[in-house]
Amino acid sequence: MRIEQHLEMTISESINTELIELLQHAFPSIYPNRRYFKQLPHLRLIAYEDEQIIGQVGLDFRVMNVDGEPIHVLGIIDLCVRKEVRGRGVGLALMEEVIALGEEYPIDFLLLFADRPDLYERIGFHTVSNTCTWLQIDDENQTTRGIGEASFDELMVRSVGDKKWTEGKLDLLGYLY
């Protein structure tokens, strides 16, 4: 297995086709016929076996604001692995690469919304209960719907810098992953 970094704007048509197939199988009820749900990530880590894509994770680098303090966040979007290779460490390898990026660059926190928190707790993520504000996007029409505000049981973070997470309001300053 090898993992490659791909800037989103450099994704070829053949990779696009494979990503659409992978994402639709991993998230059957939410993925339309495109490689993103609400917005394109900035970067993808793609795992290959031979020349076939066997896993991927999207990454979104942005400033957010927690309790009045700007923070640098690397958001983790739609980690998924082909069904036939699950249990072989592909997801863990992708996440180890994400953590390494977070530790290498000026990033304070890794942030994700997890449907399986147990998988992320093993690698240092913890659940937080911040009230979030975000830009609501209508994923079908690709339009802005408004501003959302809520808390999420699925919100998890991992510190990769020197800052400590606080339990205040979290403004995502953009869309919800």
Image (cartoon, helix red, strand yellow):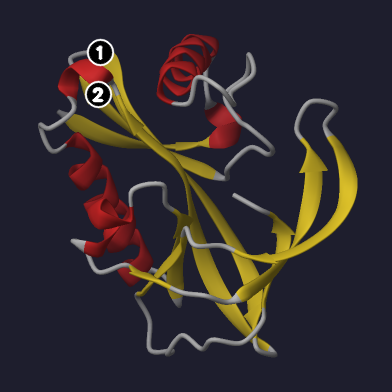
Percent across and percent down for residue 102 are: 37, 66
Amino acid at circle 2: Tyr
Considering only vertical position in the picture, is 69 above or below 114? Answer: below
Q: Which mark is residue 71?
A: none
Residue drawn at point x = 29 percent, y = 61 percent? 99
SS label for mark 1: loop
Q: Of residues 132 and 69, which is closer to you in this image?
A: 132
The answer to whether residue 115 shows anywhere in this view is yes
Relative placement, left or right, of 36 versus 57 is right
User: What residue is shown with label 1?
Assistant: 51
Relative placement, left or right, of 47 versus 49 is right
Q: Of residues 16 and 165, which is closer to you in this image?
A: 165
Considering only vertical position in the picture, is 86 above or below 94? Answer: above
User: What residue is shown with label 2?
Assistant: 48
Percent across and percent down for residue 59 are: 49, 49
Amino acid at circle 1: Glu
Percent across and percent down for residue 126 are: 34, 71
SS label for mark 2: strand
Real-space Cα distance between discs 2 and 1? Answer: 6 Å
Relative placement, left or right, of 56 versus 67 is left
Disc 2 to disc 1: CB gap under 8 Å: yes
Residue 51 quadrant: top left
Relative placement, left or right, of 157 versus 34 is left
Considering only vertical position in the picture, is 141 above or below 166? Answer: above
